[in-house]
Image (cartoon, grey):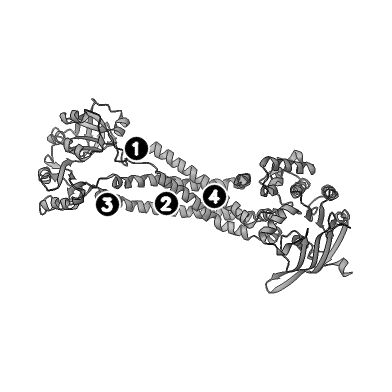
Amino acid sequence: MILKFAPLLFANLRRHLLRTAFTLGSIIVAFLMFGLLQAMKGSFDAGATIAGQDRLLTLHKVSIVQPLPKSYWDQIRRVDGVAFVSPVTWFGGTYQDERNQIPVFPVDGATYLDIYPEIVLPPGVRERWLADRRGALVGRAMANRFGFKPGQTIPLKSSIWRRGTGSSTWEVNISGIFDVQENKGDTMGIIMHHDYFSESLARGKGLVGWYVVKVRDPAKAARVARSIDELFANSPYETTTSTEKALAQSFANQIGNVGKILTGVIAAVFFTMLLVTANTMAQSVRERTSELALLKTLGFTGAGVTALVLAEALMLTLLGGIVGMALAYFAVDAFGTTARQYLPIFYISLPAALVAVLLMIGLGIAAGLLPARRAMRLRIVEALRGT
Amino acid sequence: MPESVVVIRDLVKEFHRGPEVIRVLDGLSLDIAAGDFVALMGPSGSGKSTLLNLIGALDRPTSGSIRVEGLELPNLTDGALAHWRAGHVGFIFQMYNLLPVLTAERNVELPLLLSKLPAAERRRRARAALKLVGLADRAQHRPGQLSGGQEQRVGIARAVVTDPTLLLCDEPTGDLDRKSADEVLDLLATLNARGKTVIMVTHDPRAAERARHTLHLDKGQLLEALQ
């Protein structure tokens, strides 16, 4: 039904090609920005979504970058309600080139795999890794990025730690490639044995980054966390323990403030877009007053003319919006590999795409509403006399 | 005696300009027979275009009755009037009023977009109408690529494409040279001969000569009635 009016709608958009092109360009940029921001926001939010509630993180009370003594490991293990504990340290790794930043975590192999059962290993790999002090497990995405193969020995350079020899490179043997159960995390990292990492350290030998703790009963997680912190109260290394989910959420919330600022910028961009598109439509309708009057003369009803103007505005925003979102998809795809070094889950989700479509429709209706109202109220005789 | 297609009684149309009330039509009564060709003449401001607009249901009277093809137009809603116009009236304007972004064929097809005809049939009828006005070979030209006379012929094709009973022409030759004007008038005469009722507002006595009847308006009344 509406298709028969398509040539008329397209012809109107072609009327002032340059004006239409500028308006379309603005809408495209707005939706490109929206798509990229949504990909980033989704990445920040993902941590809290995939984090476990039965896992606690024990950090230095001051900040996550302050280390904790390795001696805490045994003490935490003895706390009532604790199932497994593993130390984890941020290695700050690069591979071959300073630009190739890779997340590397020295951990206690056996307990770490018990704490994170979502890590999926091929048969025999767990045993092979635990048997090799220099062994490392490489995430599937990481392996694909650099072409790592099991059995290969690779040098991992730390930007934070130095060995007693003065070198900052640890050579590890790839024991195997790990996957993660669907939607339970990313595979853009490497885990290695903490003992191998710390034994040759020049400084900080008895220190670890933080502890990850698995509790026996998630319902008692808060009590266990309190017990751990009480254990180290008034010591030089006071701790703060919270569930992994709460920590991820608080991290997301901090980023969320940045997200809010960016959302504000996007809202401003969209508001400007609304003004630009509405102005284009208003100008276009004003210029065509006599033509709209003619359509009414020929038998188009007020509602019919209104629908035509709204359809024209919608066509403009849908066209620009779809192109903008398509470009955003391409950009996420093209720059995804680089972005995923820092934001492991970096993609435009289906809900974000649906929000974009709703925005396109909303923007089109809002931009076309006033001009459409003007067209509907047009008095034929007066408008024809204006020619 | 042919039946009257337009029956007007005591028609009054007033416009308001600030506090001032201007009575453009002042109790006018008129009958136009089916198949007639009537020229409406009169000085500027005499109310002839207003009368044409009221007959074509483009405007509403202040009071009085306009019955066209048995239908009392002031009683209809705006939507009903729009549907009625689409099926029963063809309008021809002095400035042609074609959409510059569409080809001649698409312009002629415009009124058919409101019908349920399939695209191929709409296209066929638009081409037939263009052929009728002698512009079949200009179907893909835009108005800017046509002469004034050709544009007006496209306007006539658009007016007749829905096969209306009534053709309302507001100064159809007012913007044309003599030769083009004669071609347009020939076309209107042909359409009238084929059964269309033509009502034409004009200042041009030569155009009025082509009509079967000429009615003169002055100060919102028919001179014939005054006499």
Q: Residue at x 12, y 39 (%)?
A: A205
**In the displayed structure image, the side of residue A156 where residue A365 appears, left or right:** right
State whether residue B212 is above or below residue B128. Answer: below
Of callouts 1 and 4, the N-terminal one: 4
In the rendered image, which residue does mark 2 sit on? A266
Q: Nearer the viewer, residue A263 or A283?
A: A263
Spot occupied by residue A365 in the image (x, y as percentages of width and height): 53, 54
Q: Residues within 10 Å of mark 1 (few under 14, many from 20)?
A: some
Spot occupied by residue A103 in the image (x, y as percentages of width and height): 26, 38
Disc 3 residue type (three-letter): Ser
In the rendered image, which residue does mark 3 sit on? A250
Query: Outermost residue toward the bottom?
Result: B19
Check the residue under mark 2 and report the chain it is in.
Answer: A
Tag nearer the camera, 4 or 2: 4
Check the residue under mark 3 and report the chain it is in.
Answer: A
On whether disc 1 and disc 3 are found on a single subunit, the reply is yes
In the rendered image, which residue does mark 4 sit on? A314
Element type where label 3 sits in the image: helix
Residue A338: mark? 1
Of callouts 1 and 3, the N-terminal one: 3
Tag nearer the camera, 1 or 3: 3
**In the displayed structure image, the side of residue A217 where residue A323 appears, left or right:** right
